[in-house]
Amino acid sequence: MSRDLDRLLARLEQLLPPPAPETDWTASVAFRWRRAAGPAARGWLQPVKHVHRIRLADLHGIDAQIARVEQNTRQFLEGRPANNVLLTGARGTGKSSIVKGLLNKYHRQGLRLVEVEKNDLVDLPAITDVLAGRPERFIVFCDDLSFHGAEEGYIALKVALDGSIATTSEHMLNYATSNRRHLMPEYMAENLEAKYVGEEIHPGETVEEKISLSERFGLWVSFYPFDQDEYLAIVAHWLKVFGCSAREIEAAREEALQWSLARGSRSGRVAWQFARDWAGRRGGEPGAARRAKK
């Protein structure tokens, strides 16, 4: 009987998922939430070996946005009240770069970053439990967040931000970036649900539901497309970082504008990509590309 029971337990152990790896908190200042395949799989925090070391000083044209998010982050690090943050607006304007720049600037003060994919937001309660009790201050970060309906991650994020019986840790905030303010697509037909009460317009239930998630982020920070002068200033900054002279930077202006027209965008990302291409073709300073990431 005992031998049969041992064999049964051995078979059950083979079916059960392996225990989640222990987190090495000293291995990095940034972590990714990982989960193996399978319904019973457990998640774990994987240290990021090569952290993107961008500097806030390298982000041009968004000084007001940097100041707002940095102030909120300093409040958080100092143990003062701070808000969850939603950064929305034009693509390539530095939304996620601000978060990476803040980590680069404040990791010595105990700031840590946990990156979570949209599909793994259902694990937010588990992530909160893993981070509970740690002395560091964690930003749980979801980049390019958007939903197409009431997905599991959408519901989990709403509950995690404001609505669960369990309070969130004082050592954790949620930062997210999105191209959409309300995180979900908006359709013309939804406007037909609006009701008039006297002279006031009240949005329909569908619109209210879409607004309800973004409203749970206490701080909204908006980003806008750059004009031509701002775009060229960013190009000049990166060309200088890549070792180009003032004369070379001036000579690159026309080609930089053509590059932005071909891309259909004058964003910081497009400016950085042009500078890498232009400086690289002209034999930019060795090691400059590596230093530009730090």
Image (spheres, grey):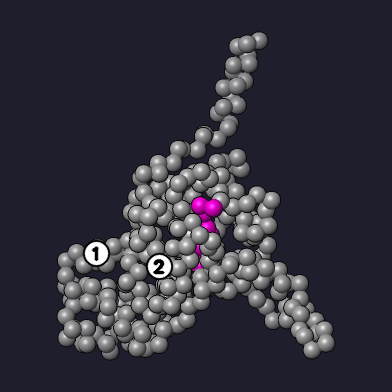
Q: Residue at image x 44%, y 49%?
A: 136
User: Does residue 109 appear to the left or right of 7 in the view shown?
Assistant: left
Which badge, 1 or 2, is on the more N-terminal residue? 2
User: Does residue 284 appear to the left or right of 182 in the view shown?
Assistant: left
Q: Determine if the magenta segment contains residue 46.
A: no
Q: Residue at image x 45%, y 38%?
A: 22
Q: Residue 11: horizontal and vertical position, in percent? A: 58, 24
Marks 1/2: CA–CA distance: 16 Å
Q: Residue at image x 28%, y 89%?
A: 254
Q: Residue 263: horizontal and vertical position, in percent? A: 39, 81
- Asked whether 110 or 40 is in front, the reply is 110
The secondary structure making up most of the magenta span is strand
- Asked whether 112 or 47 is in front, the reply is 112
Q: Residue 291: horizontal and vertical position, in percent? A: 24, 64
Q: Which residue is mark 1?
A: 291
Disc on res. 97: 2
- Asked whether 209 or 279 is in front, the reply is 209
In the rendered structure, which segment of residues is drawn in magenta? 170-177
